Image: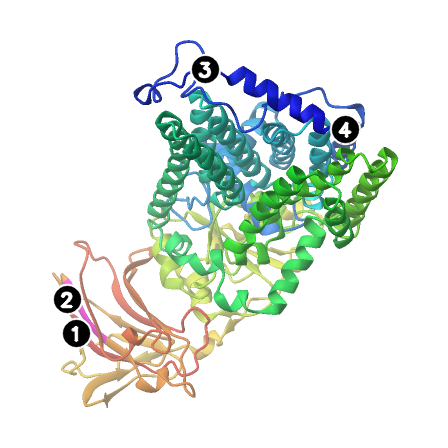
């Protein structure tokens, strides 16, 4: 073996002897015939990465493919249902409405988009479903599986560029095939394998560009890198780490050559793809943020608000329990302890090159969770981005046994089979559970919603967070309140005001618990839903508008849907609606706070004129509403309001109050004019007197409502709210 390597190096030196490097000025031009940036020898003898695979590898690939086809027609409610149905929902609406960079995610209201990743995967799924006529679930699984197998040639090319012979490459690829995370997540409706394939092809083209200095490879690396970064930038980080390590070696060789052309050309091949990748990621994040900023319910998904969620906290990184949990995830997604331990033992007998490349691959694997600690901790499917690198490291160490003449071939083969069996066992004891136990079907209420709510209408789903687990099967657009907006009816009403009158035709309430008072009043008073439920599946209750109730009941009675009952308990509110009394205006016309004086109001505790901190105020403990009839020709509103100073103290802490001003009446739902959340315990800027002023619409066909609601958690304790000034003129 050593003699063969010496002969190979001697032939390489002979082939490169006497060749002249191109001039520095020519290094940025394509050579007429070879198409090279500079004629320099590669780091390793480049081998054919697409050699014919051995029979055993083809059999293994067929077995893995057959495993991924199990339960093909099952629902996508098997694992991480939130993310799978969210991806499938966008693909469904892309198929229905066509493609756009601001692709549909119809959960937050107009403009019905909140882009998270570049919609390459969703577009492919929509296209496959439309062309073949198959379901979104089947198309999504097919695209994911195809992307996974499409990543294998890129890995083969990388291993060839590193100088490994075919046998070593096939063993390393076999280790990837039996990695537990791919045996499950390669068939889910997720973008993971598509992003992985793009990232690995970027890395392959990047390495080839550094080695050959060909423009075609450099441009291919730039293209794949840009796409990968836009589809899922977190997946690029492990591949970029491996590319950076390779680039350091290549740049060191170029500097040691002391040839200016070589240094410049290597630098160009190094920087151009990197700049394209970073630039594309930056552009996409900026574009997506601009789209999300157009909707108050989607603004929380802007990148500026996701830092802690994405990268995790220092406290997490210092917590031993968190590292233990992350370690358990590695054992059932990437490699069991016995398999990894045996691979490390094999490394003792492996050649130096195998150990060095395996170490670099392990570093690329570690880069993912070290950078995006919380994402990997919460979502085990994130290991799709980096598990291939640890699997390659494992495969290289095992393959190194064949390169050691002191290790019998039979022993090397048995060790490889043992480690492969341990990986399959780790899968069987972990993620294979979700194959063996068929997932639940779509919630029965979904069929009821499709039956009674028109396809062009909108469904109100205020307590589903923005989880589309039900919505995907409803196949309707929805208005949902995301985390942090649980009871923020002001924001919900602002978005509803962008819809045509009567567009909201269905209302689904999750669970049997009472509704927050503000949600109850908004649904049954503002939007006109009947408090008599039309159907329930035990977990979700469906309401329709009062004028649609009789027809909806007749329709569902004729269908006889399984799991759907036509009778449901009447909804309740917390606090009770009958306690939210109408109080006559208790203020004289010349009162010092509200001009003109309120016509009436609603409150749990009533209203009173008082003084707070030496100022005249109206005591209006949330929840409360004051109704003012604007004088003729009114054009503006001036406000002053605050929460009591004690609301910021630990013993009497308020969870916040939402202040809203809107127009009610005129035969339409409320039209929001102003809203502000006060949380003095969390934000010092919300303490003390707050002021606001805004113009009124030219056509004011209703009354003005000045509301203080109980905040997003709907806890009315210590919501001691005061109006300091209300002037309409």
Distance, label 3 to label 4, CA atoms, is 40 Å
Q: Nearer the viewer, mark 3 or mark 4?
A: 3
> Of helix, strand and loop, which one carries label 4?
helix
Q: Mark 2 highlights which residue?
A: 631
Separation (CA) of disc 1 from disc 3: 93 Å
Mark whose residue sits in front, 1 or 3:
3
Disc 4 or disc 2, which is closer to the eye?
4
548 or 115, which is in the foreground?
Answer: 115
Helix, strand or loop at mark 3: loop
Residue extending furthest top? 33
Q: Is residue 342 visible?
A: yes
Q: Are marks 2 and 3 in contact (CB under 8 Å)?
A: no
Q: Which residue is mark 1?
A: 596
Q: Quadrant of the N terminus?
A: top right
Above or below — where is 168 with respect to 596?
A: above
Left or right of 523 in this view: 351: right
The residue beneath circle 4 is 57
470 drawn magenta: no
Which segment did they paint magenta? 636-640
Residue 624 badge: none
């Amino acid at each position: 073996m050593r003699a063969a390597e010496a002969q190979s190096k001697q032939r390489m030196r002979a082939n490169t002897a006497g060749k002249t490097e191109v001039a520095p000025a020519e290094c940025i031009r394509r050579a007429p015939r070879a198409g090279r940036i500079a004629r320099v020898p590669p780091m390793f003898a480049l081998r054919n990465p697409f050699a014919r695979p051995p029979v055993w590898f083809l059999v293994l690939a067929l077995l893995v493919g057959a495993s991924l086809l199990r339960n093909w027609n099952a629902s996508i409610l098997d694992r991480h249902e939130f993310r799978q149905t969210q991806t499938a929902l966008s693909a469904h609406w892309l198929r229905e409405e066509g493609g756009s960079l601001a692709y549909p995610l119809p959960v937050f209201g107009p403009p019905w988009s909140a882009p998270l990743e570049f919609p390459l995967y969703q577009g492919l799924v929509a296209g496959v479903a439309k062309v073949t006529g198959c379901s979104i679930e089947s198309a999504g699984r097919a695209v994911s599986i195809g992307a996974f197998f499409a990543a294998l040639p890129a890995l083969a090319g990388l291993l060839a560029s590193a100088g490994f012979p075919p046998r070593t490459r096939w063993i390393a690829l076999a280790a990837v095939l039996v990695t537990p995370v791919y045996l499950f997540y390669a068939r889910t409706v997720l973008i993971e394998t598509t992003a992985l394939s793009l990232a690995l092809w970027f890395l392959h083209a990047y390495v080839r560009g550094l080695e050959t200095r060909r423009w075609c490879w450099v441009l291919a690396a730039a293209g794949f890198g840009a796409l990968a970064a836009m589809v899922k930038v977190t997946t690029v980080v492990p591949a970029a780490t491996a590319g950076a390590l390779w680039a350091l070696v290549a740049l060191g060789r170029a500097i040691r050559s002391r040839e200016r052309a070589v240094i410049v050309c290597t630098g160009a091949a190094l920087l151009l793809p990197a700049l394209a990748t970073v630039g594309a990621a930056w552009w996409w994040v900026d574009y997506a943020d601009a789209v999300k900023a157009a909707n108050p319910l989607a603004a929380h998904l802007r990148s500026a608000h996701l830092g802690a969620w994405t990268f995790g906290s220092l406290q997490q990184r210092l917590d031993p329990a968190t590292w233990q949990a992350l370690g358990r995830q590695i054992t059932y997604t990437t490699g069991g302890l016995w398999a990894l331990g045996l691979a490390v033992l094999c490394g003792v007998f492996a050649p130096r090159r195998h150990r060095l490349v395996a170490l670099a691959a392990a570093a690329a694997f570690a880069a993912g969770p070290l950078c995006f600690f919380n994402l990997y901790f919460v979502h085990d499917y994130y290991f799709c981005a980096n598990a291939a690198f640890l699997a390659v490291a494992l495969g290289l160490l095992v393959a190194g046994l064949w390169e050691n003449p002191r290790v019998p071939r039979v022993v090397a083969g048995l060790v490889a089979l043992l480690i492969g069996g341990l990986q399959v066992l780790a899968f069987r004891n972990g993620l294979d559970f979700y194959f063996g136990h068929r997932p639940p079907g779509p919630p029965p209420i979904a069929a009821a919603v499709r039956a009674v709510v028109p396809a062009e209408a909108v469904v109100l789903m205020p307590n589903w967070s923005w989880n589309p687990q039900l919505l995907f099967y409803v196949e309707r657009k929805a208005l949902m309140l995301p985390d942090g907006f649980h009871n923020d009816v002001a924001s919900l009403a602002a978005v509803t005001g962008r819809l045509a009158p009567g567009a909201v035709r269905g209302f689904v309430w999750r669970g049997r618990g009472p509704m927050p008072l503000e949600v109850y009043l908004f649904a049954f008073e503002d939007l006109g839903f009947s408090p008599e439920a039309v159907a329930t599946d035990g977990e979700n209750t469906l309401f329709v508008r009062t004028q649609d109730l009789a027809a909806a009941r007749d329709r569902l009675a004729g269908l006889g849907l399984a799991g759907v009952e036509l009778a449901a308990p009447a909804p309740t509110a917390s606090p009770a609606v009958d306690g939210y009394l109408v109080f006559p205006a208790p203020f004289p016309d010349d009162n010092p706070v509200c001009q003109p004086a309120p016509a009436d109001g609603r409150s749990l505790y009533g209203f009173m004129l008082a003084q707070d901190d030496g100022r005249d105020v109206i005591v209006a403990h949330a929840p409360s509403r004051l109704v003012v009839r604007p004088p003729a020709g009114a054009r503006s509103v001036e406000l002053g309001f605050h929460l009591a100073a004690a609301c910021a103290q630990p013993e009497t802490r308020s969870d916040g109050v939402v202040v809203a001003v809107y127009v009610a009446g005129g035969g339409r739902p409320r039209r929001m004019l102003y809203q502000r959340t006060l949380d003095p315990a969390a934000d010092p800027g919300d303490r003390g007197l707050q002021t606001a002023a805004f113009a009124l619409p030219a056509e004011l066909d209703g009354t003005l409502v000045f509301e203080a609601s109980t905040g997003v958690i709907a806890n009315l304790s210590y919501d001691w709210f005061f109006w300091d000034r209300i002037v309409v003129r």
